[in-house]
């Protein structure tokens, strides 16, 4: 019998960058809501450990720098789940943190763009046939509120997340004919492993600037992502939702 409390019961969802941080939080939340999940990452040990811990999630290697790896991950996931209903484009790298615009190298810029922008595009395209076949396909791109307020000394990352926001709108128009929704979430600075390097003064800056003056944790982002994957959001597409406690307001 279907559990009405589980809004994503039986939904087949894949997550990039799911081995730790926000990605792992999404994987756990999806499983808790009854979804069938496959996730990918370059962090093999962490990914395999999470899959063992959850039992109801499949882990496959994924390197967004490699188009062949993307195609293989999508096909492995579709085979394991029996199709794909939704994609969370979560995987991203920073690499440019703490460097001013004139200190960045072309190599760093290209590395960030290849994963955060090209990787999001290639994942979305690779999943499209499966999402169209689903009849209720949904993509949620994880952007960042740094692209909304122009965080300094983070230029490559900020530019990449601005590109993800713009790409979300274009993809929504292209994929809409296939009944596939495409939306983006822009989290604020969230307390996860990937933000451990962020200087204390940046954390304090966020804390003081939020309307809700507390630290942001992964559970704060789970709800909006799950909503955008649910049937309640079937007529929502091309939208950006900042989730940052009111640090940036639309």
Image (spheres, rainbow, N blue to C red):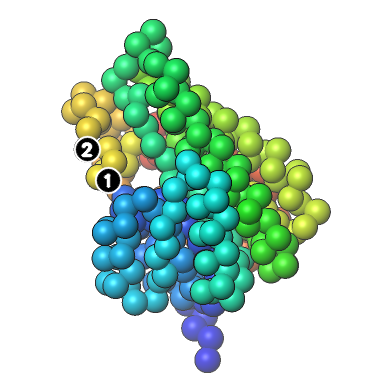
- Residue 137 at x, y = what percent? 66, 61
Residue annotated with mark 1? 192
In this view, which residue lies farthest toward the right? 177
Residue displayed at 63% across by 36% down: 167
Q: How many marks?
A: 2
Q: What quarter of the picture does the C terminus occupy?
A: top right
Task: Specify the quadrant of the image occupied by residue 194.
Answer: top left
In this view, which residue lies farthest toward the front? 68
Residue 235 visible from this viewpoint: yes
Q: Nearer the viewer, residue 206 or 180?
A: 180
Q: CB of mark 2 within 8 Å of CB of mark 1? A: yes
- Residue 213 at x, y = what percent? 29, 37
Side of 71 relative to 95 (left or right): right
- Residue 77 at x, y = what percent? 52, 66
- Residue 217 at x, y = what percent? 30, 48
Residue 218 visible from this viewpoint: no
In this view, which residue lies farthest toward the left? 200
Q: Is residue 153 above or below residue 191?
A: above
Residue displayed at 45% across by 35% down: 144
Q: Nearer the viewer, residue 38 or 70?
A: 70
Side of 44 relative to 37 (left or right): left
Q: Is residue 47 above or below residue 67?
A: below
Task: Specify the quadrant of the image occupied by residue 93.
Answer: top left
Side of 204 relative to 170 (left or right): left
Residue displayed at 67% across by 62% down: 131
In this view, which residue lies farthest toward the top? 102
Q: Residues within 10 Å of mark 1 (few under 14, many from 20)?
A: some
Residue displayed at 33% across by 69% down: 51
Residue annotated with mark 2? 196
Question: Real-space Cα distance between discs 2 and 1?
Answer: 7 Å
- Image mark for residue 230: none
């Amino acid at each position: 019998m279907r559990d009405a409390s589980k809004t994503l019961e039986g939904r087949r969802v894949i997550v990039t960058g799911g081995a730790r941080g926000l990605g792992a939080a999404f994987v756990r939340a999806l499983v808790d809501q009854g979804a069938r999940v496959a996730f990918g990452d370059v962090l093999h040990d962490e990914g395999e450990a999470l899959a063992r811990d959850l039992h109801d999630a499949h882990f496959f290697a994924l390197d967004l720098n490699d188009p062949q790896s993307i195609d293989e991950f999508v096909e492995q996931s579709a085979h394991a789940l029996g199709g794909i209903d939704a994609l969370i484009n979560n995987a991203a790298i920073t690499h440019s943190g703490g460097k001013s615009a004139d200190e960045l190298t072309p190599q760093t810029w290209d590395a960030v763009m290849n994963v955060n922008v090209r990787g999001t595009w290639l994942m979305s395209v690779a999943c499209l046939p499966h999402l169209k076949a689903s009849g209720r396909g949904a993509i949620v791109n994880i952007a960042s509120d740094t692209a909304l307020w122009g965080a300094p000394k983070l230029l490559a990352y900020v530019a990449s997340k601005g590109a993800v926001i713009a790409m979300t709108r274009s993809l929504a128009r292209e994929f809409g004919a296939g009944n596939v929704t495409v939306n983006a979430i822009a989290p604020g600075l969230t307390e996860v492993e990937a933000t451990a390097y962020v200087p204390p003064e940046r954390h304090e800056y966020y804390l003081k600037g939020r309307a809700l003056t507390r630290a942001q944790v992964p559970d704060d982002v789970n709800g909006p992502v799950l909503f955008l994957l649910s049937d309640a959001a079937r007529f929502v597409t091309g939208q950006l939702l900042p989730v940052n406690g009111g640090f940036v307001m639309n």
